[in-house]
Image: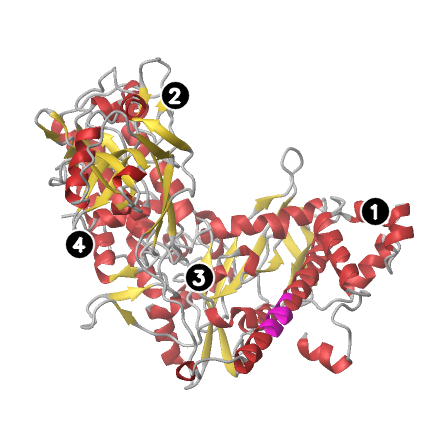
Amino acid sequence: MVKDTDDEGEDEWAPFCDKEEWGLAEWLVKSLGQTGTDEFLKLPITQNRTKPSFHNNQLFLQKVDELPHGPAWSCKKVSVKGNRTDENGQSLHEDVELWMHDPVECIKDLIGNPLSKEHMVYAPSRAYQDKAGSQRLIDNMWMADWWWDKQKELPEGATIAPIILASDKTMLSQFQGDKSAWPVYLSISNIAKEKRCQTSARATVLIGYLPATKLDCFTSDAHGVDMVCADLYIRRVYPILAAYVADFPEQCLITCCKENCYPKCLVAANEQGNPLNSLMRDVELTKEILERWRSGQHPVEFDEYGLRAVFKPFWANLPHTDIFMVFTPDLLHQLHKGVFKDHPVKWCLDIVGKDEIVAHFKTIPDYPGLRHFKKGISNIKQWTGTEHKEIRVVIVVQALLDFCYYARLHTHMSKSLDALENALTILYAHKDVLQELAVHEHFNIPKLHQLSHYVQSIELFRAADRFNTELPERLHIGFTKEAYRASNKHDYEEQMVLWLQRQESIFWRTTYLEWVAARAARRTERESEYNSDSDDENKGFDVVPVVSQDIIHVLAKTAPHPQQSVQHLETMHGTIDFLPALKLFLQKHLLHNHIVPGPQDRFNIFRQVIIILPPDPRVSELSKCLRVRATPETLPSSSGRKPCSPKTIRHGTVAVHVAQVHVLFRLPRQFGAYSRPLAYVEWFTPFREPDESSGLHQISRSTRRLRQNSAVIHVDEIICPCHLIPKMGQSVNPTWMSANVYELASEFHLNTFIDLETFCMSTMIT
């Protein structure tokens, strides 16, 4: 776009008159449909005052179509032969349309986008956590094995563009009709996954709408394609299909196998519940079997391998591609929905019973983002088993939870992959107890067998955290559903691609203008720095701000509850030992203070403190913002109150302890100038050994002289909130509720599964 504009000498706002008319055009495309645009342009105030160079929607769209855009859309007519016949015995045919972009042109756009320059990698690398190289790190695809292996197969100096495909059929009409679309999305693993998964970055693009036909539009050029990359270097790029994101039915469809079989390996249908190292499916052998079946030979392997009669799959001639290895772990459909929701939840309901499960849910304390199912989950029957078998069931569920959370890690190390494998080993070792209890008949479940391939997939491709169908489902909104709504609902495919092309034109022109403005601003800033006076010792050096990697605590500038009495704190916040705790704090930290706090003092109270944690590379590349609240809430009974959630407190350099924060406050001025905010807390005991059955760490209320062990601490000692689950025993105490259980219970488990950060932190608790 830069080259075209410079060569032709066009104005940057062309084909529109000026900046204001461009702003109007951008708003019309993004906000109004064609009818609304036409009505707006025909308004007297628009024609007489605004006076745009286009007077109706048709003229406006002609200007929009003059804007540069990405690869053009093309339509291919495909004739599909069915298994139904007409009255003459001839097979019926149906013509369908395949709308698509040229994938190679899309890859050129992606790898050459200057906006992705800082997020682009062109060669594989290895990273280790320790100097000895014993703890390998696996994050993006260039840190995994697949890229290294493929690089060895190509000429020296070759650049691989690992292609990621994703497809997911979606309905277009919500309440009536059967209109659907089957979009296919493409991205490349040269782009960091954080950038690639931002829908606003357009780093994952739509390459076509499938009917139900093959996809043979990829290049089979074994010599690569010259491409201009984001850093302006020209490289010989080899686009190779590396990963395919699809749910299980689509995986089976793509690999030409039946849904009762597994698309990656040849495990038998009656052995999918066993920890076997099955033979992987072979591309050349599968093509040979399909060709023999097509020629009428009927090989026995066709049924043994569970194949379908698809004789020309799109992947048959793709270079350097093993279609059976490209399917990546799908955390959404395989783990969360396919395994955990469909199986362990049902197991627990069948064993424990509806009433007891409902009682447990009612007792679980509140936590930000935690949803309560206080009316139960489903209708199930009561069951009681022996203690030994119950413990084994807990072990099975615990192992599956561990597997789910380790699989979600953003960055893997050798030890986290070992933990993932160990969790699966424990699951297989104890799963038979569910058959003994008649809870589950068998474990020949394809989605459960998929778990045995997770470690291999992570080592080959990368961490599984963003290799799932959540991204395609988000992309459906802009690339499919909104495009359909902009059509007249008849022959909508052509209208959809034209609408998308116009949206793309506006997006890229807006992005280009923002890029030009930012580049000009940087040039001006550099010139200003060069021309400005400065100390001699600073010349030639960039001034880099120092950013602390420690935890940041943020309080409101003004306390929302000023001048609160001690009686109010004791009554509403439950700070029964506030004054004694404050006296001990003053004696320790304000040695020259001689004022003794008493009932007459008043304190400025804060509702919450915001804690900003530095990024944990195992979880995310972004900082984590958490809120610790200390606001009492009234229960239905007038005398009750809802206590605040426990928090993790930092003591020393490594050890952490749990405390319940009751109030956040500042010292009054009479005690001297003390800037650090304070918190009144009640301590829990240090973490004990994990529970034998659940594996959760155990803690209890800490007491001193038969009273709650309380203290006043600095707010900046608080690390993060945590969630405790009361130890309920054989049955739940009927007086316990989520609002009062922290007050009434004395023994608790640390809920390590409340979020991924807590799960990672729990692995370091000793």
On-image quarter of the N terminus: bottom right
Q: For residue 361, which quarter of the picture?
A: top left
Per the image, label 2 sits on a secondary structure element best described as loop
Q: State the CA–CA distance, disc 2 to disc 3.
A: 39 Å
Decide which of tag 4 and tag 1 comes sooner along the chain.
1
Residue occupied by mark 3: 193
Other-residue count near label 1 (Cα within 10 Å), few / some / many at <14 / 14–19 / ≥20: some
Q: Position of residue 493 (x, y in %)?
A: 70, 52
Q: Which residues are magenta?
A: 514-521
The answer to whether residue 627 is left or right of residue 671 is: right
Residue occupied by mark 1: 40
Residue occupied by mark 4: 653
Decide which of tag 2 and tag 4 comes sooner along the chain.
2
Looking at the rendered structure, the kind of residue marked 3 is Lys
Q: Nearer the viewer, mark 4 or mark 1?
A: 4
Marks 1,3: beta carbons within 8 A: no
Per the image, label 1 sits on a secondary structure element best described as helix
Per the image, label 4 sits on a secondary structure element best described as loop
Other-residue count near label 2 (Cα within 10 Å), few / some / many at <14 / 14–19 / ≥20: few
Looking at the rendered structure, the kind of residue marked 2 is Lys
Decide which of tag 3 and tag 4 comes sooner along the chain.
3
Q: For residue 715, which quarter of the picture?
A: top left
Looking at the rendered structure, the kind of residue marked 4 is Thr
Q: Nearer the viewer, mark 1 or mark 2?
A: 1
Decide which of tag 1 and tag 2 comes sooner along the chain.
1
